[in-house]
Image (spheres, rainbow, N blue to C red):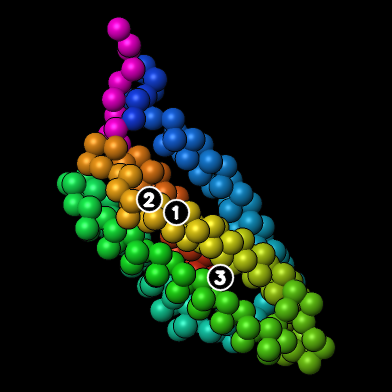
Amino acid sequence: MSDAVVMSGGVHAEPGMRVYNQKLGMWVFLTSEVMFFTGLIGSYLILRSAPGVEWALPGEVLNVPLTAFNTFILICSSVTMVKAFAAIESGDQKGLRLYLVATVVLGAFFVGVQGFEYYKLIEEGFLPHCGEELAALVPSCHLYGSTFYTMTGFHGTHVSIGVLCMIWVTVKAFRGKYTQGDHGGVEVIGLYWHFVDLVWILLFTIVYLI
């Protein structure tokens, strides 16, 4: 007789773990991501608070209202992800598909707005290596540009990967691969999606508001 325990999501967990392998793997991966983004954000805060180094205020360089709107969009996508998971837990296939599609659309919209923001900033000369004219107007322009694109660029890459994975989960949902008793894939991608949303809220607060 097997000692395996059937967990939420319809998959088996090893005795004593109380969590199925895919979910455990995602938690381990997200732990490494926490350390990665902590290093990026910590380095930015140290550089910005260094004595004798003047930085431009975010509102003088960045489009804060646009990014605030984009942040709201990403938060909404987190809500639709919760709705998708709740739908499949109750056996609502139509709700699962609807909310997954909504999450994909909102996530793709976020990436699109970020791409537009980059385009406008680059057009104005705000780069890791700023032009002489902008560098004269924006204190620590080179350092500001380098840290800005590194942090937001890595996060944008994570969101883009999440959108691609979400598309795959959505395709499987339309094929009827997830059921009320077997929906581990939806839960795992949900964990990742909520993580990138949380990281962005931190980045938005630190990079755009402080």
Q: Is residue 127 visible?
A: yes
In the rendering, at what x and y percent does residue 191 appear?
40, 48
From the viewer's perspective, is 24 left or right of 186?
right
Label 3: which secondary element: helix
Task: Name the magenta segment's main secondary structure.
Answer: loop
Amino acid bearing label 2: Lys
From the viewer's perspective, is 204 left or right of 80?
right
Residue 10 falls in image quadrant: top left
From the viewer's perspective, is 11 left or right of 125?
left
Mark identifier at residue 207:
3
Amino acid bearing label 3: Val
Residue at horizontal 28 percent and vertical 25 percent from the top:
6
**For the residues bearing labels 1 and 2, Cβ distance under 8 angstroms:** yes
Q: How many marks?
A: 3
Closer to the camera in the image, 72 or 145: 72
Q: Which residue is label 2 attached to?
A: 172
Can you name the residue that lies furthest to the top here? 1
Residue 5, magenta (yes or no):
yes
In the rendering, at what x and y percent does residue 2 appear?
32, 11
Residue 84 falls in image quadrant: bottom left
Mark identifier at residue 158:
none
Q: Which residue is label 1 attached to?
A: 168
Label 2: which secondary element: helix
Q: Write the start and end of the magenta stretch as one range.
A: 1-10
Residue 167, magenta (yes or no):
no
